[in-house]
Image (spheres, rainbow, N blue to C red):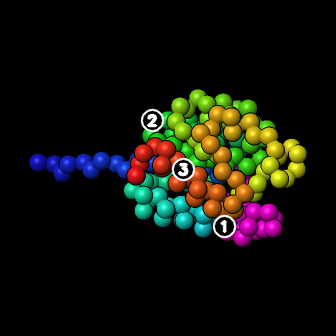
Amino acid sequence: MPPMALPECPRILVLHGPNLNLLGAREPDIYGRATLAEIDAALAALAEAAGVAVECHQSNHEGALIDLLHGAKGRCQGVVLNPGGYTHTSVALRDAVAAIGIPVVEAHLSNTEARESFRRRSLVGAVCLGRVMGFGPRSYFLALDALIEHLGLR
């Protein structure tokens, strides 16, 4: 008799937008010194402790982020999204979040409300479950925790 397949644990997609691959070196006074790899490793550890898997991706390309969002539908229970500069400009990314029908939490390292006026408007935020910003890497951790709680995964 073949072995029984184990149920797959719930999956959360974490998407990092443009320029976040430069974390740790890019404007550390604004974005901190933690690298993207360090943030992803901490997210994986937090998720594992909660019995959840995270899948982390970064892209500087709007279409790639949209493709990853589309691919999450039916495969992931939720998304933590830092759209980076696309937060303020991308109707297409906003529409992709709205189209996938799964909860998305927007996360930002800096407090975009306290920065330049053009950063104070999020096109994506209106179609997200919530937004977390201004706590450095902890913004991602808080967003993941809130999403896990919202989904009833613990």
Q: Is 32 part of what is drawn in magenta?
A: yes
Q: Which residue is mark 3?
A: 146
Of residues 42 and 132, the one nearer the viewer is: 132
- Badge 3 local density, few (<14 within 10 Å), some, or many (20+)? some
> What amino acid type is highlighted by mark number 1?
Thr
Of residues 108 and 21, the one nearer the viewer is: 108
Work out whether mark 3 precedes mark 2 in sequence or the reverse, and give the earlier one: 2
Q: Which residue is mark 1?
A: 35
Q: Residue at x 74, y 36 (%)?
A: 123
Q: Residue 137: x, y in percent?
A: 65, 62
Q: Is residue 148 above or below residue 24?
A: above
Separation of residues labelled 2 and 1 (CA atoms): 30 Å
Q: Which residue is mark 2?
A: 74
Label 3–label 2 contact, CB within 8 A: no
Question: Do we see residue 29 in this rendering?
Answer: yes
Work out whether mark 1 precedes mark 3 in sequence or the reverse, and give the earlier one: 1
| Range shown magenta | 17-35
Q: Residue at x 67, y 69 (%)?
A: 34
> What amino acid type is highlighted by mark number 2?
Gly
Q: How many marks?
A: 3
Secondary element type, mark 1: loop
Which of pointers 3 and 2 indicates the residue nearer the eye?
A: 3
Q: Residue 16: x, y in percent?
A: 65, 52
Splitting the image into 4 quarters, where does residue 126 fall?
top right
Q: Residue 92: x, y in percent?
A: 70, 32
